[in-house]
Image (spheres, grey):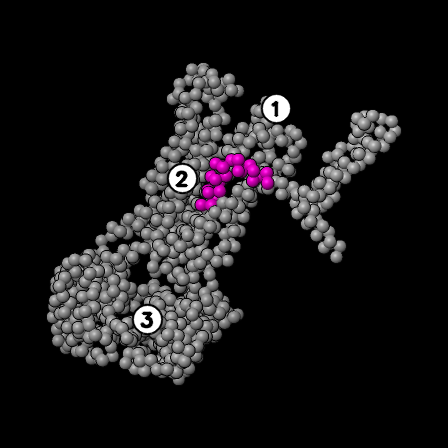
Amino acid sequence: MGTIRRFLRRLRLLTHRGVAEDSMDAEMRYHLECETADRIAGGMSPEAARISALRDFGGVERFKEEARDARGIRPVEDAVRDLGYAARLLRRNPGFTSAVALTFGLGIGATTAIFSVVYGVLLRPLPYAAPERLVALWERNLPRNRDQNVVSLENFNAWRGRAGAFSGMAALVPRSVTLRGDGAPERIPGAEVSTEYFSLLGVAPAVGRNFAPDDRAAVILSHRFWQQRLAGDPAVVGRSLAIAGAPHVIAGVMPAGFEPPQFGWLGRQELWFPLIDTPEKRAWGRFLLVVARLQPDVTLEAARAELAAIARTRERESAGNSGWSASVVPLKEQITGDARVPLLAALAGVTVLLALAIVNVGTLTLAFMRRRRHELSIRRAIGATDGRLFRQLFTQSVLVGTAGAAIGLLAAVPGLSGLVAVLPPELPRASSIALDRPVLLTCIGVAAIATMLFGTGCALRGRSSRQTGHGRNVPGTRTSDRLSGGTLVATEIALGLALAIVALLMTRSFGSLRSVDLGFDSTGVVAARVALSPGYDTPDRRRGFFDALLERLRATPGVTEAGLISTRPFGGESVSTTAHDGDAPEPAVAERLSADVRYVDSGFFRTLRIPLVTGEAFEEEPAATAPPSVVINERLARSIWAERNPVGRRLRISLFGTITGRVVGVARDVHLLDARTPPRPTLYLSDRRFPSDARDILVRADGDPDAIIPSLRAALAAVDPVLPLYQVAVMPRTVNESLAADRFIAVLLAVFAASALLLAGVGIFGVFSSDVASRRREIAIRMALGAHETSVAMLMLRRALFRAIPGIAIGSALAFVLARSMSSLLFGVEPGDPLIYLTAAAVVLLLVMLATLVPAWQALLRSPLSVLREG
């Protein structure tokens, strides 16, 4: 109770400090007046009595200080006074205050925005129960060195039944369906999943139930589908929904915040169906994606070892598993995929920028301390202790650092919005990016640590300054200042140069990607996908539909050519299989060549203007009893037949069991996946020989490709009005979007590098200007003794370059380390490209020269006599 009363009394004294001071003054006056009255009564004059009373009473201010100490709030009072003093000082120096706050704010704001993206994509836990225990399982093709291959149904069942390292395992495969309501038909993305899939993730439907083992024609809806298609009807469970011409019972609705895993060839999902094990699906081979949950006491390495052992057993049990093993990948790592390296590169870049901002703040503070050296010496001379000076200078730095951090955090809000707007469209988990509590706490912590660092440095530096009574530095102080300035300059040069080199490497890489010859002409081409309804249940009906559609498309005004392909260029991976010379012995498993398979018609080559090096495209597919025609690319031709002409030769393909085709032509190599991935061995089979219920349509327009899209929809509606045209894309735009990640990193690092060079330039100029100012007497003496302006300027320049050389060396080494760590992002340029390093070093040297020569020239223009008179 006494402690509380003491605290309240001290709080009252602190908040009513003026009243307490007035009371203390009144008490002191009362005692002095009493003493004076006693002396007057003893016969002394009033003046002599007052002087005697003051002498006997002692120092009034000393008693006041003792009284203040007795209150127990002296540290708080000193802190308040220091804070007020710092605020007045910063207000009287708006240039310094603004420069430091904005510089620090730039570093904190950029760091906060980038860290928000990194945390949301890479660090934020997945929205599932115990997400760290979730993994993705793959088959591993040993001869092809492919670690992440989809899984066969038989192997999935074997893993699920035999692996004890997992508490649960579920398979899923994408399944899109066509729905038609009151408007146009729409293609809805979905997936078939094992019945235990949602319970494995630890997410239950918000409405209804999970799948039951005996469900066959059931469906679970996403919250968005439920709201948009069914108006959020609470009685939706048990209703029938017509999908693909068959009724499906709605089992449940997932929660609004549910984010299903997206990886591999599994994209956005709005509907989920039970995965049924059928002989037809077993015949599909490998097509499943698999997720599993580790047992609480099982490590990732133990699970990998157990699954690999099961795969070896399966290899002995089935010839189709020869050369196959298994791999286990943490689910978060699987989902983030290729985004990890670019985002970590961005984080490294912004960390360098933040470090440069902190160093720049230190540079500005050092210059400010030099200007205040005389003031600090006077304050020490009249009794200020080193501790008190340290506290005041530290408070000043904390105040300006807090202002800068506040500016940075406020600027991070619009900065993050702008950053999200330009993120690559395929960035995973983009919906998880937010400026929320974990991000803010981390960035506030970084700002606090940075403020403490440069605040402590500033306070120590200012406290240790010494001057003589004539205002000159004591011996060693100027040398120490030059050493401090040189260290800061070298640090700024190193950080700015490192960021500039990395940015130039990424810019050069992006330029190399843009200049890649893709092997096809995308100008004016529109791609769209068509999936047939279950009514097209025979090969003849499928062929008839696409023949009719292509005929209408080619007759559409503005269309010059049209063709078909199973998976469009830059539309993702296709089926791959092994192929070898049909007239040669079958090679060993480890020597078999893997080739991508695309089903096309002859119009595909004409539409994309892909030339045939030799032979011809399959204009007329031979009879079903004859070998199918095959067009191969140049790389496949070289890999199998070297310099021999492959046209007319037999090609054995591990497809539909095994088929033997006849090579009718060799097409130019084409980048089918992206500009970065080299053309792989590819074989093209005739769409007419192998018809399917889903194809990509490619159409070349002689005008604006966007303007032809409504005509494409009209042509499809004329052939079959219940089929939707979906995944519509203009191919030049698709090609451009494929470079979005590289463009994003290149632009971001370029902005960081420009900001870093600007900060470095300002900091270097400030240090060198201060250095030249401190040498103005030396310059004046040299000029008075007959030195030429050029020789003095070159002397200053040599000193500046001597400081810059260590920074350039350290920055080059740092840049090489950063470039090596992000080498997977580079294309067409080596991490140690000497031209880029020399270019960046030349830019930095130019900055150093300008920052030296400008103040040196200003000093040379002054009269030596006037400088010497100033002393």
Q: Earlier in the sequence, mark 1 or mark 2?
A: 1
Tag 2: amino acid: Leu
On screen, 630 above or below 243?
A: above
Q: Earlier in the sequence, mark 1 or mark 3?
A: 3
Q: Report the disc number at residue 337.
A: none
Residue 638 visible in the picture: no
Based on the displayed image, in which of its 4 quarters is residue 837 positioned?
top left
Give whichever of 166, 27 is nearer the camera.
27
The residue that disc 1 covers is 469
- Image x and y of residue 746, in percent: 34, 49
Magenta segment, which residues? 84-106
The residue that disc 2 covers is 758
Q: Evaluate if marks 1 and 3 touch, with contact meaning CB atoms under 8 Å apart.
A: no
Give whichever of 28, 489 is nearer the camera.
28
Q: Evaluate if marks 2 and 3 touch, with contact meaning CB atoms under 8 Å apart.
A: no
Give whichever of 823, 17 is nearer the camera.
17
Residue at 62% in and 36% down: 389
The residue that disc 3 covers is 189
